[in-house]
Amino acid sequence: MAGATRERERDLELLIPVAGGGGGGGVGIIADNGASNSKSSSPSSSPAAVISSSHHHSGREAFAKVIRSWASKKFMSGCVILLPIAITFYITWGFIHFVDGFFSPIYNHLGINIFGLGFVTSITFIFLVGVFMSSWLGASVLTLGEWFIKKMPLVSYIYAASKQISAAISPDQTSNAFKEVAIIRHPRIGEYAFGFITSSVVLQRSVGDEELSCVYVPTNHLYLGDIFLVNSDDIIRPNLSVREGIEIVISGGMSVPQILTTVNSQTIQATRIGNFPAVKV
């Protein structure tokens, strides 16, 4: 009992300085130790938290990239689909307004304000002009009008160029229209160019006659181009109509069929043989 009492007194003496520092001090030391323990424990747990937060952030960025890529692709798909439709409607609407403007002022002067009436009148007028010009009297009037136009210095050149372009797409093709689509080797071996056969001639030389075709190769849509005299045997004739050839030139080659077949040039030339003008050299 005495030994136990001494040990208890010794423990109390050891605790006196701590208590003497004030209960708050002891508690403060314990609190400080707790804070230090929490601080020492926080570094051990911070790497895991940083890794989890970085994974969460990278996952959100990947999801956002997927959403942006999907949205941009769908937006571009919508533009690709709607752009030709919008251009078609815009050009058609502008054409209707342009044609409607020929006769709409007359109807407005008469007090008739009906949209589209001028357009219908213009289309009817164009149809009647086509019917009239197909007759003998209309052809005579057209010939007389062209004679007056050809006497004008500047207007004659504009009219001649415009007439050749319109004749190229006319269903009733004349001698000045595009005869057929042609593919020639130009400008180097292994390269080809789309063109249109406009006429054919026979080149008479001392060594013999040579049949040549005048091939017009557009370089700026249909208005400007180069003219080549090519041997008829060296021309590749694809199975394309003149309208399809014009569409290929205007579209920049986007409407070219994936497979091109050729037609027999002998059959085509047989229908025109004997009608070639002769060029003497």
Image: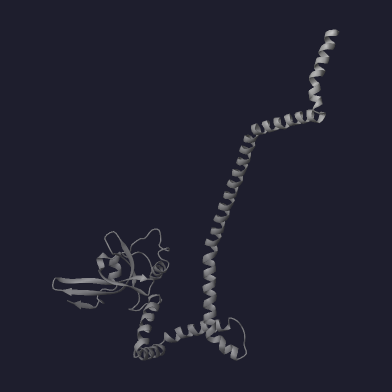
Residue 123 lies, in percent from the top left, at 51, 81
- Residue situated furthest right in the rendering: 1
Q: Is residue 26 in view from this perspective?
A: yes
Q: Is residue 108 left or right of residue 281?
A: right
Query: Quick one: quadrant of the C terminus?
Result: bottom left
Residue 152 lies, in percent from the top left, at 35, 90
Closer to the camera in the image, 261 or 42: 42
Q: Is residue 172 in view from this perspective?
A: no
- Which image quadrant for residue 189? bottom left
Q: Is residue 27 above or below residue 237?
A: above
Could you tell me which residue is drawn at 51 percent across and 73 percent down?
A: 91
- Which image quadrant for residue 118? bottom right
Q: Is residue 274 left or right of residue 101?
A: left
Could you tell me which residue is drawn at 81 percent across and 31 percent down?
A: 24
Closer to the camera in the image, 46 or 1: 1
Closer to the camera in the image, 225 or 107: 225
